[in-house]
Image (cartoon, grey):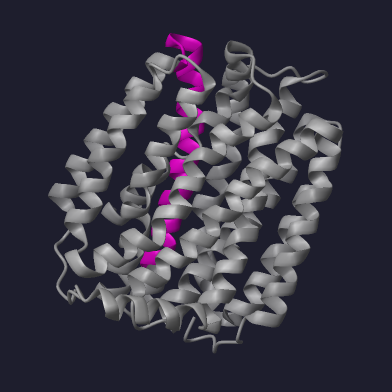
C-alpha cells in the first residue's frame, strides 16, 4: 500500500500540466515548442539529478531521503500558481523535477535491498502501478480543478496533497533493515564506471529513453490535437481521456506473470510492438478509436517499463541506487528530447508527423531490446 502511494505522489506533479496545455498556450501566448518544454522542464531536471541523488542516497539512507524529497516537492508546486510568465512556470517546473529522483530512484533501491525473489518483482510492479495511477490522477485532477477554480488555485490543491503524502510516508514506510551506507565518493565513481560498461544498465537506459520519449510525446501533443476541430475538447474532457492510464494500473501487476513465463527480453519486444500498434490507431478519425489507440499504446509502455525496472533490480547487485539513477537519467532524458522533438514535429505536420516520429523511436526500442537484452531465465525475471 505505502509503496504504491509513493509511486502515486512521485508522479502526481510530473505530467499534471498536460491536461491544461491548450489553456496555458492561450494564457501565455505560447508556441507548441514552448508548451512541450514546460512539460520537459520537470523531466529534464529529473534526468540531471537522478544519478547524483542515487549516489547521495547510497551514502545517507533511504526513508529520510524519500520523505524529504516529498516535502521539498510541495514548495515549487505551490509556487507554480504564482507564475507571471511561461518562463517562470518552466523554472518552477524544473524545481519540481529536482526532487522527484529522491523519491523514485531511492524507492527502487529500497525495494531491491529489502526484498528479493517474487516479493521484489511484485512490489516493483505495485510501485509502477502507483506511478501510473499518480500520472493519471495529476492530469485528471488538474484538468477538472481548472474548470472549477482555475489552474492556479488547482496547483495549491496539488501542493497540499503532496504535503499530506509526505506525512503519510514518514509515518507508514518501514525503516531500512538491509541498507549499508557507502559514503566513499571514490568508490561511488568506480561503481559509476562499472555501470557505464554494464550491459544490463546500458540496455535498460536506452530502452527507458525510448519509452518516455514515446509516452511524453504522445500524451503531450494528443491534447493539442484533440483541443482542435473536429473534437474541441475542454480541459475536463481532456483530463477524462487520461483515464486510459488506469488500464496500466491493472496491466502492470499482470506483467509479472509475463516476466516469469517469458523473461524480460521477450516480454519487452512484444510490449513495444503492442505500443506501436496503439500509436498507429491514434490516426483514426473517431474519438473512441483514438482513445482505444492510446489505451493500447500506454499498456505496451507500462509493461516495458515494469520489465526494464525489474531487469535492473534482478541483474544489478552493486550500487543499486546509482544504477537506478542512471536508468532514470536515460529515461527522463528521453522524455525531455521527446517533448522537444515532438513539439517541432507537431508544429510542422501536426499529429500525423508526430505519430511517425513516435513510431521511429519505438523501432529503435525494438532494436535495443532485440540486440541488447540478455535473455534471462523466466524465474530470474
> In the rendered image of this protein, does residue 29 appear above or below residue 354?
above
Instruction: Looking at this view, name the residue that lies furthest to the bottom.
Output: 377
Q: Which residues are magenta?
A: 123-151
Q: Is residue 344 left or right of residue 81?
A: right
- SS assignment for the magenta stretch, majority: helix
Q: Nearer the viewer, residue 111 or 330?
A: 330
Q: Can the viewer see residue 298 in this picture?
A: no
Inspect the magenta stretch and tell me whether residue 149 lies in it.
yes
Image point (45%, 24%), residue name: 88
On the image, the x and y values in percent for residue 230 come to 83, 19
Label count reads 0
Q: Can the viewer see residue 52 in this picture?
A: yes
Inspect the magenta stretch and tell me whether residue 312 lies in it.
no
> In the rendered image of this protein, does residue 166 appear above or below residue 62?
above
Image point (56%, 54%), residue name: 333
Image point (39%, 63%), residue name: 51
On the image, the x and y values in percent for residue 356 come to 84, 49
**Residue 162, picture quadrant:** top left
On the image, the x and y values in percent for residue 19 come to 57, 27
**Residue 228, picture quadrant:** top right
> In the rendered image of this protein, does residue 331 appear above or below residue 264?
above
Amino acid at each position: 500500500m505505502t509503496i504504491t502511494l509513493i509511486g502515486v505522489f512521485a508522479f502526481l506533479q510530473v505530467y499534471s500540466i498536460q491536461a491544461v496545455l491548450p489553456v496555458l498556450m492561450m494564457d501565455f501566448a505560447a508556441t507548441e515548442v514552448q508548451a512541450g518544454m514546460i512539460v520537459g522542464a520537470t523531466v529534464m531536471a529529473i534526468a540531471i539529478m537522478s544519478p547524483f541523488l542515487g549516489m547521495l542516497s547510497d551514502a545517507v539512507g533511504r526513508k529520510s531521503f524519500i520523505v524529504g524529497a516529498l516535502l521539498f516537492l510541495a514548495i515549487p508546486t505551490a509556487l507554480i500558481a504564482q507564475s507571471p510568465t511561461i518562463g517562470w512556470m518552466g523554472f518552477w517546473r524544473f524545481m519540481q523535477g529536482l526532487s522527484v529522483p529522491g523519491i523514485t530512484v531511492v524507492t527502487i533501491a529500497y525495494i531491491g535491498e529489502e526484498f528479493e525473489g517474487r516479493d521484489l518483482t511484485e512490489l516493483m510492479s505495485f510501485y509502477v502501478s502507483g506511478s501510473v495511477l499518480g500520472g493519471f490522477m495529476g492530469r485528471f485532477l488538474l484538468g477538472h480543478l481548472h474548470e472549477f477554480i482555475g489552474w492556479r488555485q488547482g496547483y495549491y490543491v496539488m501542493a497540499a496533497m503532496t504535503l499530506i503524502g509526505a506525512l503519510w510516508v514518514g509515518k507508514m514506510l518501514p525503516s531500512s533493515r538491509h541498507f549499508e551506507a557507502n559514503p566513499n565518493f571514490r568508490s561511488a565513481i568506480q561503481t559509476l564506471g562499472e555501470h557505464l560498461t554494464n550491459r544490463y544498465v546500458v540496455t535498460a537506459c536506452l530502452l527507458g529513453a525510448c519509452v518516455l520519449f514515446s509516452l511524453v510525446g504522445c500524451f503531450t501533443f494528443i491534447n493539442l490535437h484533440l483541443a482542435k476541430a473536429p473534437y474541441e475538447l475542454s480541459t475536463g474532457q481532456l483530463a477524462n481521456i487520461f483515464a486510459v492510464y488506469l488500464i496500466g494500473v491493472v496491466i502492470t501487476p499482470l506483467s509479472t506473470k509475463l516476466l516469469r513465463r517469458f523473461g524480460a527480453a521477450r516480454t519487452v519486444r512484444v510490449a513495444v510492438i503492442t505500443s506501436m500498434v496503439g500509436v498507429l490507431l491514434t490516426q483514426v478519425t473517431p474519438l473512441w478509436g483514438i482513445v482505444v489507440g492510446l489505451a493500447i499504446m500506454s499498456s505496451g509502455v507500462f509493461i516495458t517499463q515494469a520489465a526494464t525496472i525489474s531487469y535492473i533490480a534482478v541483474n544489478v547487485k552493486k550500487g543499486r541506487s546509482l544504477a537506478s539513477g542512471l536508468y532514470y537519467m536515460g529515461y527522463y532524458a528521453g522524455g525531455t528530447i521527446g517533448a522537444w522533438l515532438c513539439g517541432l514535429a507537431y508544429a510542422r505536420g501536426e499529429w500525423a508527423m508526430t505519430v511517425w516520429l513516435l513510431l521511429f523511436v519505438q523501432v529503435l526500442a525494438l532494436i535495443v531490446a532485440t540486440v541488447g537484452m540478455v535473455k534471462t531465465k523466466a524465474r530470474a525475471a
